[in-house]
């Protein structure tokens, strides 16, 4: 009876793990990042493993496993690099949207907001509202979450102060014209704004968010272990 329960529990947790992995893939590929990043990784992986496809009938599990491992490494490396570097993100957009042309903003303003985080202090983000002109007509558009700044859970500054500081940095970028706008050649109402052109912007990247979240988990576990050891030491002394 106990063996049967353990078997059912193992199947349940394996199934739960697959659901978690599928949810993570959907989030990264279809929500957090453009789908074309996945196709870049798929193309590179197919090129690397092209010669191995002849062995699919002989050892499908090994060939398929190696393919999935390679595409995972390439995809995660790609989104990590692009999330850390606004400059490279802009270059990728120029290549993938080679018909889109830069356009000058006629008016531009920003609004800064706060999002409370999970296993982190939270993050500031800015939405940019702008107008540009094409063929003698003005168009309005906005770029939600054009720039983010993550804060670790150990940051003790007041939320209002962090938002004000972030808002000032956004205003400074707009003042210095540290942004670029691209518009579609066929649909003038479609455009894309990149607020930062920095080569590296670590604190606004997914990598920074993941690193600080992992650090929070590790510190929490170490804190709990320390408390357990202290209390167990005191109980032994009694």
Image: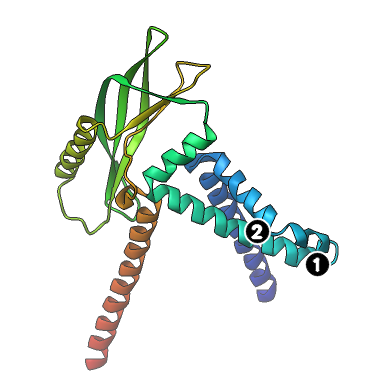
Label 2 secondary element: helix
Picture quarter containing residue 7? bottom right
In the picture of the structure, the residue carrying the numbered disc 2 is 68
As drawn, which residue projects farthest toward the bottom? 237
Cβ atoms under marks 1 and 2 closer than 8 Å: no
In the picture of the structure, the residue carrying the numbered disc 1 is 59
What percent of the width, then of the height, locates residue 46? 69, 53
Quarter of the image where the N terminus is located:
bottom right
* Residue density around tag 1, few if under 14, some if 14–19, many if 20 or more, within 10 Å: few
What percent of the width, then of the height, locates residue 211? 36, 60
Name the residue: 31% across, 30% down: 127
Instruction: Give the camera-side residue of 40 and 157.
Output: 40
Picture quarter containing residue 212? bottom left
Q: Could you give the CA–CA distance between mark 1 and mark 2, rounded to whole angstroms?
A: 14 Å
Instruction: Give the camera-side residue of 51 and 139.
Output: 51
Q: Mark number for residue 46?
A: none
Q: In this rendering, would 133 be left or right of 99?
A: left
Q: In this rendering, would 47 be left or right of 161?
A: right
As drawn, which residue projects farthest toward the right? 57
Instruction: Give the camera-side residue of 140 and 138.
Output: 138
């Amino acid at each position: 009876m106990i063996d049967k329960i353990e078997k059912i529990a193992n199947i349940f947790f394996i199934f739960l793990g697959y659901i978690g992995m599928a949810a993570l893939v959907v989030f990264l590929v279809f929500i957090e990042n453009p789908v074309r990043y996945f196709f870049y990784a798929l193309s590179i992986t197919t090129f690397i493993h092209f010669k191995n496809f002849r062995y699919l009938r002989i050892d499908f599990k090994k060939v398929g496993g190696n393919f999935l491992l390679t595409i995972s490494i390439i995809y995660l490396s790609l989104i990590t690099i692009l999330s850390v570097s606004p400059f490279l993100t802009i270059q990728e957009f120029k290549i993938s949207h080679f018909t889109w042309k830069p356009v000058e903003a006629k008016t531009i303003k920003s609004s800064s907001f706060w999002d409370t985080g999970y296993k982190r202090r939270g993050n500031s983000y800015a939405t940019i509202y702008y107008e540009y002109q094409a063929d003698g007509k003005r168009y309005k558009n906005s770029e939600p979450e054009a720039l983010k700044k993550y804060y670790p859970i150990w940051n003790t500054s007041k939320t209002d102060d962090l938002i004000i500081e972030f808002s000032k940095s956004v205003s400074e970028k707009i003042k210095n014209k540290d942004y670029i706008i691209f518009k579609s050649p066929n649909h003038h109402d479609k455009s894309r704004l990149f607020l930062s052109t920095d080569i590296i912007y670590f604190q606004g990247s997914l990598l920074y968010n993941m690193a600080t979240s992992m650090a929070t988990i590790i510190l929490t576990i170490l804190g709990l272990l320390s408390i357990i050891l202290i209390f167990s030491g005191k109980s032994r002394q009694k």
